[in-house]
Image (cartoon, rainbow, N blue to C red):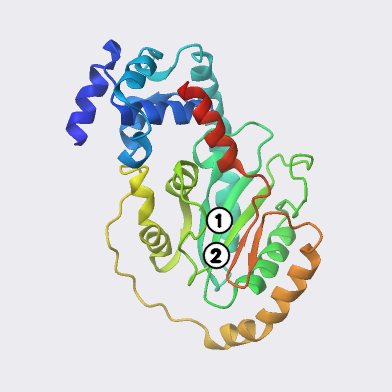
Amino acid sequence: MLLLESRKIKNSINNNFSKNEIVSLIYHSIFNYPLSQKELIKWFAGDKASKIINKSTRDILSAKISLKNGYFYLKGQDNFIFQRLLKKRIGERKKIMAQRAAKILAFIPTIDLVALTGAVAMNNANENSDIDLLIVTKKGTLWTTRIISYVLLTLSGIKVRKFEKNPLIDEQKDKLCINMWLDEESLSWSGMKNLFIAHEIAQVIPLVNKEKTYEKFILKNKWIKDFWPNAVSFKQEVSKVSKNDDLILSIIEFVEPLAYRLQKWYMREKITREVVTPTRAIFHPVNWGSLVKKRFNQLLV
């Protein structure tokens, strides 16, 4: 299949695009993100995503796609090619900041995964963007680990965004936004499964990966290959059993229920559509999935 897609891309100057490629280009155009040939192969949309396009729609949309300087984009969006190059430089700088934070968080024994997510992971962040992180903790330690993490990062001089009811107002430039915390027993995505969520998971970049937790996370969310089959590898990994400090874990597990109740109480008036449970904390007050779907449907017309 990959060879077939590669052949089509080479001939795409004649607008011979598959439905899968069109879906990918339309989706990424929402984020002002032209795709190179290599990226169009990686982000080849799955059949579950492309079935909404019929042949006549494909022909119409195919004619709206252009190629310039090695990037494919919707006509009228060629200015985003230069922006992509600028954003790549911004993204690399922010990644260095994320790596510094990850090295500090790696010292916490109850953290198994620190991963970069969001716009920075795609090298598509603006100068004023924050830095999104995903953290996976050992079983029964999430909320205590969260407190320890914030204290350690603050003492290290790293700015972390607070949980705000309206994050668009908050000054966010270069601040860490740890907006997703998962217990190792709660790696499967239980919410709505769509093109946007699948992409967000597929674009995750592990910075600290203990006991192959990143691989476990991807395997628990194999459904994303229905939307983006080439984006990540789904090979089964066998992880080594690590030696944990039982005393530290016992203390944290003892404190954990109190840590959870205190933090949930503190956030009680700010919670809108966030997910706050003993095994996961997901802070996405804006329903980006719904906004992206609406914009995607508009571009199909």
Residue under pointer 2: 182
Coordinates of residue 239 in the picture (x, y in percent): 33, 70
Does the rendering let one see residue 78?
Answer: yes
Mark 2: which secondary structure?
Answer: strand
Name the residue located 58 percent from the left edge and 52 percent from the top edge: 133
Residue 189 in picture, x, y percent from top left: 48, 59
- Where residue 12 appears, as percent x and y from the top left, is 28, 17
- Dot 1, how many residues are within 10 Å of its Cα: few (below 14), some (14-19), or many (20+)? many
Name the residue nearer the viewer: 174 or 263. 263
Residue kind at label 2, given as amino acid type: Leu
Q: Which residue is mark 1?
A: 134
Circles 1 and 2, Cβ within 8 Å, touching? The answer is yes
User: Where's the N terminus, which quadrant?
Assistant: top left
Identify whether 245 is placed above or below 94: below
Residue 113 horizontal side relative to residue 48, left or right: right
Residue 288 percent location from the top left of the image? 60, 41
> How far apart are labels 1 and 2 at the CA level?
8 Å
The amino acid type of the residue labelled 1 equals: Leu
- Labels in figure, total: 2
